[in-house]
Structures are given as C-alpha cells and as structure tokens.
Image: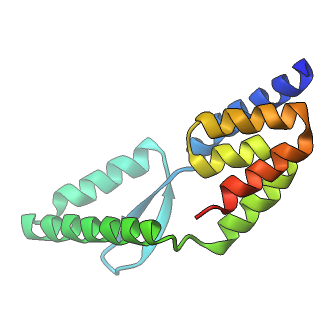
Amino acid sequence: MKRHLTLIFTLLFITGSTLPSFAAFIIHNPAGIVEPVKNDSTSVSSALHYFMDLSRKERRSLIKEAKSEIKEFKAAKKAGSEPSTNQLLLVILAILLPPLAVYLHEGVINNKFWLDLVLTLLFFLPGVIYALIVVLKK
C-alpha cells in the first residue's frame, strides 16, 4: 500500500511540475495570424515591446478583443462545450489511473480526489467506477 501511495504521489508531482512548463503565449502579429510562442524571456519582452509600440487606439482595441475572447471562452466552458478528445482521454485515464483522472478533471486536490484515492487503494474497481462517475458527470 505504501508503494502505491508513493507511486501516485510521484506521478502527481511529476505531472504538476511539468505541465506548466508547456504553457505558451499567443501573439497576434499585424497580418492577423495567431502563432504560439514558447514561454521564454526574449519572446515575452518582444511581445511587450510590440504592444507598447502600438498606438493607444490599437492597444485599446487589442485589449477589448482579448476581453471579448475571454468572455466567449468562459461562456462556452460554462455551456459545457469542451472538446470531446479531452473527455475521451479522461475516461481512458480514469480506467488506468483513477485518482489522476479525477485530479485533472477537477483541477484541484479536493474531497473527490481523496475519496477516489482511498477507493482505488482499497479496491481498484470502486475507484475506477467513482472516477468514471466524476469525469462523465456534467
């Protein structure tokens, strides 16, 4: 049992420490093409210089556009229109590693995660069933 706990916490630590390193910024260039850029200081500073070189009117329009995109994203997320590939991957992960699937679905370590961890450690099948219920719940 101690080995299982160590394995799960190691996986959670590795997942939690490596996922933020894959974050990317999106920079709008004058041609209107959106391109992902790695998160390093040179690209951030070049994006900041590009933004500061714009006129006040252009900056306001970019900020307004970004705010409207954020509102649309939040509305789509609230409506439940997540991509089906995420749901499918979470279901597969719920079968293989139930606590990790619950953690990724919820986004935080909460009571659902701990309950699923205990169920998985005691008997694997109830942990899988509970993880599937949490992941597939609307």
Foreground residue among 66 and 57: 66
Residue found at the far top of this picture: 2
Residue 11 visible to the viewer: no
Numbered circles on residues, count: 0
The percent coordinates of residue 21 (x first, y second) are 58, 43
Coordinates of residue 114 in the picture (x, y in percent): 69, 32
Is 30 rendered above or below residue 70? below
Q: In this orientation, does residue 103 appear?
A: yes
Q: Position of residue 118 (x, y in %)?
A: 78, 31
The one nearer the camera, 44 or 129, is: 129
Asked whether, in this view, residue 2 is left or right of residue 64, the answer is right
Q: Quadrant of residue 6?
A: top right
Horizontal side, residue 121 vs residue 100: left or right: right
Q: How is the image coloured?
A: rainbow
Q: Residue at x 76, y 49 (%)?
A: 130
Percent x, y of residue 46: 34, 53
Q: Nearer the viewer, residue 118 or 108?
A: 118
Q: In the image, is residue 32 above or below residue 3? A: below
Q: Residue at x 69, y 70 (%)?
A: 85
**Could you tell me which residue is drawn at 81 percent across and 52 percent down?**
129
Q: Is residue 67 above or below residue 43?
A: below
> Of residues 27 and 46, which is closer to you in this image?
27
Q: Quadrant of the C terminus?
A: bottom right
Left or right: 36 as drawn, with respect to 33: right
Identify which residue is drawn at 42% across, 42% down: 41
